[in-house]
């Protein structure tokens, strides 16, 4: 039977600076072995939330507990060193005058032999078993990251807080080290909170994403759900390029270049934004722009003129100026497709992949 108190629980965490709430009513539940990503743009409160959980900054309100033990509320404020929380940051923060083994041993308790055995075990786990006598400056960036990980997990933290720890690594190293790190933490049953501003990293790593904006969590859930059911236009745009088609409701319908959209639930006169990602805007290749025969899902076709086309590596991105209203829409096409500017083509969109939001 699952322990309802297991893992990290954060309730209505709030922090103000100069009267402004930089973190406001943030609540999280992270179970052992689960990875939750705090995702959002710079300045949205992600790192401050991490510091509040760690105890290196003090909330103005809220509650933090781990495995049912309260670390912070209106009558508790346990010091950071007593919270059994691990920390990993972008800069690794290794001690340059200490060997790799001494860096990993820093903060461990127990006898000399117990600490030595624990250090060696940690170094073996991160594939650095023969590097104990080396010094940080003798290691590559990826090796330094592994030492930082070994040091962070050596005390067996119940919670690991990670503030963009992989952003200093080049792309070739990043994926492998990132996956190895999370495999170890999941194996240990550690609850992980990871801060990132990169949606792709969050989608790859997280069991759950908490999307932050202006100090608040605006959407929380599994990556698939957050991506495919965004709460608003800004949430959709944070994960990918989007096309926005604007219209006004009349009789539960909204007129667009692609025909009338059924938009029930909105009163007449409501300004709406119909959002679709470029990969769901389809170019009709079969008819070469002569005039397509639409399917029910695609709805009414609309013609546009190519403004520019760029090859992006695995796909091509084509920008169109639409005949209907002069709006600019982008379509992504697998592989290489580079029509010349001025080419007229018909477009159709997958109505089932559109999101409808009232104009903010």
Image (spheres, rainbow, N blue to C red):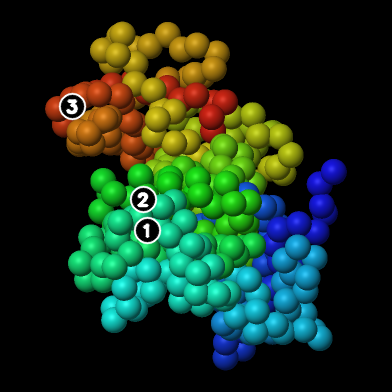
How many angstroms separate mark 2 from mark 1 (CA)? 8 Å
Q: Do the residues under discs 3 and 2 have CB atoms within 8 angstroms?
A: no
User: Residue 104 placed where, x, y %?
Assistant: 43, 69
User: Residue 222 placed where, x, y %?
Assistant: 61, 43
Residue at the bottom extreme, as displayed? 18
In terms of depth relative to the viewer, which is nearer, 223 or 136?
Answer: 136
Please give the residue where the numbered disc 1 appears in the rendered image: 146
First reached walking from the N terminus: tag 2 or tag 1: 2
User: Residue 252 placed where, x, y %?
Assistant: 69, 34
Q: Do the residues under discs 3 and 1 have CB atoms within 8 angstroms?
A: no
Mark 3, Cα crowd under 10 Å, few <14 / some 14-19 / many 20+, is some
In terms of depth relative to the viewer, which is nearer, 73 or 319?
Answer: 73
First reached walking from the N terminus: tag 3 or tag 1: 1
Q: Is residue 90 left or right of residue 21?
A: left
User: Residue 94 placed where, x, y %?
Assistant: 35, 74
Q: Is residue 123 left or right of residue 38?
A: left
How many angstroms separate mark 3 from mark 1 (CA)? 43 Å
Quarter-of-image position of residue 45: bottom right
Q: Residue at x 26, y 61 (%)?
A: 141
Up/down of 49 relative to 237, above or below: below
Kindly tell me whether residue 138 is visible in this rendering: yes
Disc ID at residue 338: 3
Residue at the left extreme, as displayed? 340
Up/down of 346 relative to 107, above or below: above
């Amino acid at each position: 039977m699952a322990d309802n108190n297991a893992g990290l629980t954060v309730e209505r965490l709030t922090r103000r600076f100069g009267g402004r709430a930089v973190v406001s009513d943030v609540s999280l539940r992270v179970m052992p072995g689960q990875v939750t990503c705090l995702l959002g743009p710079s300045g949205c409160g992600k790192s401050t939330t991490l510091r509040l959980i760690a105890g290196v900054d003090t909330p103005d309100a809220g509650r933090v507990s781990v495995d049912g033990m309260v670390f912070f509320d209106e009558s508790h404020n346990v010091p950071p060193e007593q919270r059994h929380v691990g920390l990993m940051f972008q800069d690794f923060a290794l001690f340059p005058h200490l060997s790799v083994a001494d860096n990993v041993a820093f903060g461990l308790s127990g006898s000399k032999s117990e600490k030595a055995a624990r250090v060696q075990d940690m170094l073996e786990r991160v594939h650095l078993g023969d590097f104990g006598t080396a010094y940080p400056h003798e290691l590559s960036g990826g090796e330094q990251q592994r030492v930082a990980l070994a040091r962070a997990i050596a005390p067996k933290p119940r919670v690991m807080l990670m503030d963009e720890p992989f952003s200093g690594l080049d792309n070739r190293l990043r994926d492998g080290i990132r996956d190895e790190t999370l495999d170890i933490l999941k194996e240990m049953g550690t609850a992980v909170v990871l801060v990132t501003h990169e949606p792709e990293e969050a989608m790859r790593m997280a069991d759950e994403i908490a999307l932050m904006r202006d100090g608040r969590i605006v959407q929380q859930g599994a990556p698939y759900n957050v991506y495919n059911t965004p709460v608003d236009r800004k949430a959709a745009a944070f994960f990918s390029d989007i096309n926005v088609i604007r219209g006004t409701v009349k009789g539960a319908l909204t007129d667009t270049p692609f025909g009338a959209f059924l938009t029930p639930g909105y009163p007449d006169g409501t300004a709406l934004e119909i959002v679709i990602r470029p990969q769901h805007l389809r170019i009709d290749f079969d008819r070469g722009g002569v005039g397509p025969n639409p399917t029910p899902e695609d709805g009414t076709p609309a013609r546009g003129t190519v403004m520019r086309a760029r090859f992006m590596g695995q796909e091509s991105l084509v920008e169109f100026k639409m005949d209907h209203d002069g709006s600019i829409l982008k379509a992504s096409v697998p592989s290489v497709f580079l029509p010349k500017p001025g080419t007229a083509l018909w477009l159709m969109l997958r109505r089932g992949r559109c999101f409808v939001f009232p104009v903010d």
